[in-house]
Image (cartoon, rainbow, N blue to C red):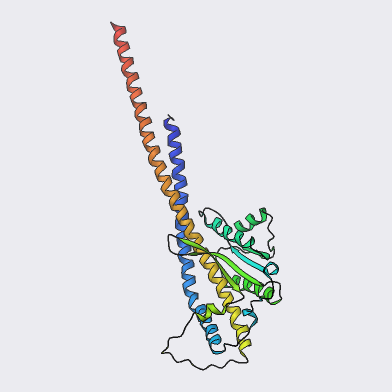
Amino acid sequence: MANIREIQTRINSVKDTMKITNAMYMISSTKMRQAKKKLSDTEPYFYGMQGEISRILRHVPELEHRYFDLREEIPAEKRKIASIVVTADKGLAGAYNHNVVKVEEEILDSPGEHKLFVVGELGRHYFAKRGVEIDTNFQYTVQKPTMHRARDIAATLLDQFDNGELDEVYIVYTRMENSISSEVEKVRLLPLERSSFNEMKMPLNVQREAIALYPSADAVMDSIVPNYIVGMVYGCLVEAYASEHNARMTAMQSATDSAQDIIRELSIEYNRARQAAITQEITEVCSGANAQKRKRK
């Protein structure tokens, strides 16, 4: 059995660790609430953009636009596929990063010429160690996602898609279902699918108003779609940021609970060791007293 001093040292060490995990839980809780608020504040605008695209497609069903061009003439093995992978900048978040990387590895195993864009230091280090080619000019952190950063990312992807350097663009991120569970999602940013906008059906009793598009429907789409892509990227970054901190909250809560269990077990062991030491001291005192009595006799 360990002596009393060793047990006391271990208890103090676990208590110090528990203070850290509890503080990290509180920090992640605050950051997650802030991220969810930012997302809820900006969602109405981008849902409005989605509604306008749906309205244009509804009124101009024959519209052919480059952002809706599926490029079906290009065979699967020659398609240039880009993936934006959103991981965390650090660990201590359970299986959060592992789940994202696992989905991306499935994409890399599919047919096509793949190009990888990574947001987050941990994912960048992971793929670099495995020899996966990463766009080195595309280096962003996931901390405090901003609209400016989303615009930079969207501009890079739109330019390469327009120039024919990319045929498909996906983003892999984590969406928080609720405070308990989250799910890794793969969303195609480009080309856009008409079916995803056609789902926004108008009620039968709502008048279908006439609209005029100036200078043309193509020009309007050229303006709206990039803003819509920016909104998609921003929403994914904020959602992933909130999911990361939710995962870290869960991991830190689990670590804090484990620390409490360890302290409880060590406290029992400490009390037993202390009781044994006291018993031994009493025994030694009694033995000494008896020896003195025998000596006097």
Q: Judge whether 209 appears above or below 247 on screen.
A: below
Q: Quadrant of residue 88?
A: bottom right
- Give the percent coordinates (x, y) of residue 134: 68, 61
- Give the percent coordinates (x, y) of residue 292: 31, 11
- Give the percent coordinates (x, y) of residue 216: 62, 91
Q: Residue at x 45, y 37 (%)?
A: 9
Asked whether, in this view, residue 93 is left or right of residue 74, the answer is: left
Q: Residue at x 61, y 78 (%)?
A: 226
Asked whether, in this view, residue 235 is left or right of residue 274, the answer is: right
Residue farthest to the top, as pictured: 297
Quadrant where the C terminus sits is top left
Q: Judge whether 20 appears above or below 139 on screen.
A: above
Q: Quadrant of residue 7?
A: top left
Of the pair 165 and 220, the residue shown nearer to us: 165
Of the pair 33 and 190, the residue shown nearer to us: 190
- Give the percent coordinates (x, y) of residue 171: 59, 67
Please give the count of numbered marks on the rendered protein: 0
Quadrant where the N terminus sits is top left
Is residue 102 at all visible to an observer of this figure? yes
Q: Residue at x 52, y 54 (%)?
A: 95
Q: Judge whether 213 appears above or below 181 on screen.
A: below
Is residue 120 at all visible to an observer of this figure? no
Q: Residue at x 33, y 15 (%)?
A: 288
Of the pair 81 and 128, the residue shown nearer to us: 81
Q: Judge whether 41 appears above or below 216 on screen.
A: above
Q: Quadrant of residue 2?
A: top left
